[in-house]
Amino acid sequence: MFTPTEIAKFKQEAFSTFANSKRKYQQAAAYILMLNTGLRTGELLGLLNSDIDLEHRVLHLERGVKEVWRRDGLQAEPGRDVKVGKLKSATSKRSVPLNDTAIAMIQDLRKEAYFGEDTPLVPDEHGDFTRPVNFRKRYYRILEAAGIAKKGLHSLRHTFASNLVNGIKQADGTIKSLTPRQVADLLGHSTSQITELYYVKKDTSRLHGITDGFNL
């Protein structure tokens, strides 16, 4: 999971530029989009521009991208192919709301590269689906340059979910949070138990003294 300080460091490095004002990293906005939607890597890379409805501030997940080893009969050939297919489960097919940051990141990605409505939001240089391995390598380069300990891409989703469940302090001092059920639906989990297991902070203070009177 990312701390607020690490998020700030990551953003600063991800959007950093060379002396000629050209950005150091491609698709930098895609990582911040993941941080604000909780999308899995394959879900993000499978998104088409036509799956996004900015007017209604929502995106619709229809497919996912994964890498598979090339096979010639039973013999695996060197190299991997990008396979576009069904999502992980029935609950993975969902609509995800977009906050202001998510919308800004989508606009940033389209400004950087746009090949048409029926092409990926996060395309490679030819307008095809981006290889997960390349997307991951770039992310690790940003982490290293920003001086952040190595953590998987899943940490972006994990950070988003944890903040939703455990709450974020608002400008007026109140804490805004969602229920595990709401977060489960947002993330595409089949049950809220999965959400609670991974993302709800364990409040051990509530356990203090509860075994008093259970002397066996």
Image (cartoon, grey):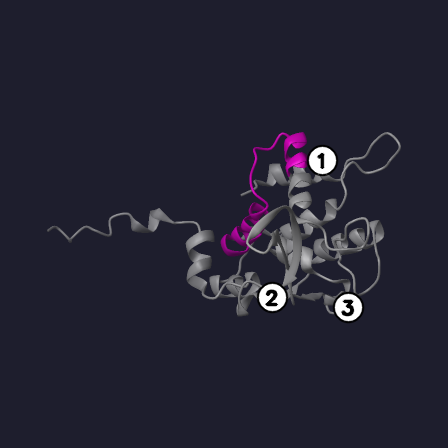
Label 2 sits on residue = 86
Q: Which residues are magenta?
A: 140-166
For marks 2 and 3, the one nearer the N-term is 3
Label 3 crowd (10 A; few <14 / some 14-19 / many >=20): few
For disc 3, the marked residue is 55
Looking at the picture, which amino acid does disc 1 mark?
Glu
Question: Horizontal and vertical percent for residue 69?
Answer: 60, 50
> What secondary structure predominates along the stretch shown in magenta?
helix
Q: Is residue 156 toward the left or the right of residue 126 in the image?
A: left
Q: Secondary structure at mark 1?
A: helix
Q: Residue furthest left?
A: 216
With 168 as the anchor, is 48 left or right in this view?
A: right
Marks 1, 2: nearer the viewer: 2
Q: Quick check: is 177 in the magenta stretch? A: no
Say which residue appears at 56% left-offset and 48% top-offset.
154
Q: Nearer the viewer, mark 2 or mark 3?
A: 2
